[in-house]
Amino acid sequence: MSKYTKEDIFRIVEEEDVAFIRLQFCDIFGVPKNIAIAASQLEGALNNECLTAYL
């Protein structure tokens, strides 16, 4: 599996003109969850800074 750096992800989002990103994860009980964020919120999400506002 190839690994992407944050810079790679930002570049791809910009190049592909991505508007929204869907994030998937499991909560502490193992229940799958997902949210969509605007591309402008991606940096905060990758730094674990903005997700609690959505849960």
Image (cartoon, rainbow, N blue to C red):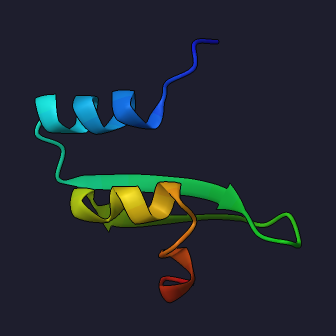
Q: Nearer the viewer, residue 25 or 9?
A: 9
Residue 50 pos. (x, y %): 47, 76
Q: Which quadrant of the figure has residue 31?
A: bottom right
- Does 1 appear above or below 52? above
Q: Is residue 34 left or right of residue 16?
A: right
Q: Quadrant of the C terminus?
A: bottom right
Q: Please report the residue visible at 57 percent of the width from the left and 12 percent of the height from the top.
A: 2
Q: Is residue 5 left or right of residue 42?
A: right
Q: Nearer the viewer, residue 2 or 21?
A: 2
Q: Please report the residue visible at 53 percent of the width from the left and 60 percent of the height from the top.
A: 47
Q: Is residue 46 left or right of residue 17?
A: right
Q: Please report the residue visible at 23 percent of the width from the left and 62 percent of the height from the top.
A: 40
Tell me if I can see residue 16 in this picture: no
Q: Please report the residue visible at 85 percent of the width from the left and 63 percent of the height from the top.
A: 30
Residue 4 pos. (x, y %): 49, 24
Tell me if I can see residue 2 in this picture: yes
Q: Number of numbered discs present? A: 0
In the displayed orientation, state which residue is furthest to the right: 29
Q: Quadrant of the N terminus?
A: top right
Residue 46 pos. (x, y %): 50, 54
- Does 54 appear above or below 4? below
Residue 28 pos. (x, y %): 86, 72
Q: Nearer the viewer, residue 45 or 24?
A: 45
